[in-house]
Image (cartoon, rainbow, N blue to C red):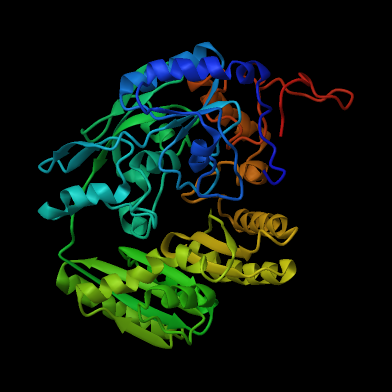
Amino acid sequence: MSGLAMPKPDDATMRRRDEIVADMRIIVPGEGVVDAANSMRAFESDGLTAYRQLPLVVVLPQTVAQVSRVLKYCNERNIRVVPRGSGTSLSGGALPLEDAVLLVMSRFNRILAIDFPNRTVVAQPGVTNLGITTAVEQEGFYYAPDPSSQIACSIGGNVAENSGGVHCLKYGLTANNVLGIEMVLMSGEVVRLGGSHLDAEGYDLLGVMTGSEGLLGVVTEVTVRILKKPETARALLIGFPTSEQGGQCVADIIGAGIIPGGMEMMDRPAIHAAEDFVHAGYPLDVEALLIVELDGPGVEVDHLIGLVEAIAYKNGSTTCRISQSEQERLSFWAGRKAAFPAVGRISPDYYCMDGTIPRKELPRVLAGMRELSEKYGLGVANVFHAGDGNLHPLILYDANVPGELDKAESFGADILRLCVKVGGVLTGEHGVGVEKRDLMPEMFTQVDLDQQMRVKCAFDPNHLLNPGKVFPQLRRCAELGRMHISGGKLPFPDIPRF
């Protein structure tokens, strides 16, 4: 796996594979267990396809009772478990382990309840993000967080990664739209956090679980809030001679107190790739393209369009097109939504990064990425949620050229270091997974990481759920706070460390 260090497989578990597979077939009968190597290939990686690994066995439960029995069985026998949704994660969060049961939640694919008066939907974790909107749109409602992968990504995976999307600037990330979950702990215990009510008493464990990347428990049910569609929504397509001018325009729009429904930006390589792919009518003579969507009452939208247009021209925009119909508005977004696959047509491979910075630092970071591109000799296409500073640089490389994947990884690591340096964070919505795991010390001290690990220990004391992800080294819960170096030697040398 490209030299990626992962936990050493447990020999005792590997020797008992046949027994484990047979027991899984008893717990999840029918077609719920996949153990043939060729059949498991479909699960060997997630969206971060640079890393691949066949699991010990793939298990696809259909009921909460089956999930509970699988986790309890594995907990009692010290068997690792990697939860997986639709496999669209871009950080390696669902990367299997050689000695782990891959617990795939895709058969949990039903919407359980729709409550329009209370504006909530209860869905199983395998329901797609877009599936929730489709289920309620006939009554004029929708689910606001909308990742570009919304046609495929699951709501359970959205909870695990705290996913966002183009409209998260105004309407919030998954954390702002999830009201409750049902989850199964590694012990097999089924617990509920939150619900259809506005808020829950006690500690915010729902907040802890949202974005926990499968390290704390397995989500089996999700309650989300739905919103009424706005009266009017119109978009502006604004072109700039430089990315820096586009970035400054973003900062000025927010600084003026305007909060668009969505505000996205693309640079020249991404613009050309998207236009060639979907023919959305993007201008091809600009270096940066900003899509600004304004929604609300018609009079307010018209007023805000005038303000944004003035700010754009003040920042040197050379083109400004305003949608005149719903079809035209959707066409503006079509290219942005298809930007990732579009870039796949201009490069054999690309490495999708995810970091977040203060909006005011956009011009500086975009300039820094150009310098890094020259340093590494690799192209980069930028597509990002400009409104909240969530960057998605796509590093272009060819995996068939020796050393290019390593260069792409180093390039990406330097981009993330730059994000942290300017006051940003390592991830906005893709999670840490394995991709950013070894960069965590760039942002957190060992004391910070130990405190985070203590939360992990409270839910999963034996570190059986999704090990090797997020934390740059495996630590026994008992040794937290007592790690010290003596004579240049680590204590507990038998513990796997990355």
Image quarter hosting the C terminus = top right
Question: Seen from this angle, which residue lies furthest right?
Answer: 487
In the visual, does 414 lie left or right of 392?
A: right
Snapshot quadrant of residue 25: top left
Q: Is residue 457 visible?
A: yes
Residue at x-position 55% and y-position 18%: 18
In the visual, does 464 lie left or right of 135?
A: right
Residue 388 placement (x, y as % from top left):
43, 59
- Residue 65's place in the image compared with 83, above or below, is above
- Residue 282's place in the image compared with 477, above or below, is below
Residue 322 placement (x, y as % from top left):
28, 81
- Residue 47's place in the image compared with 169, above or below, is above
Residue at x-position 58% and y-position 37%: 470
Question: Seen from this angle, which residue lies furthest top?
Answer: 76
Image quarter hosting the N terminus = top right
Residue 166 placement (x, y as % from top left):
37, 60
Q: 201 and 349: which one is in front?
A: 349
Q: 408 and 484: which one is in front?
A: 408
Q: Is residue 204 visible?
A: no
Snapshot quadrant of residue 297: bottom left
In the visual, does 118 lie left or right of 107?
A: left
Total numbered labels placed on residues in the image: 0
Residue at x-position 16% and y-position 49%: 136
Residue 16 placement (x, y as % from top left):
59, 15
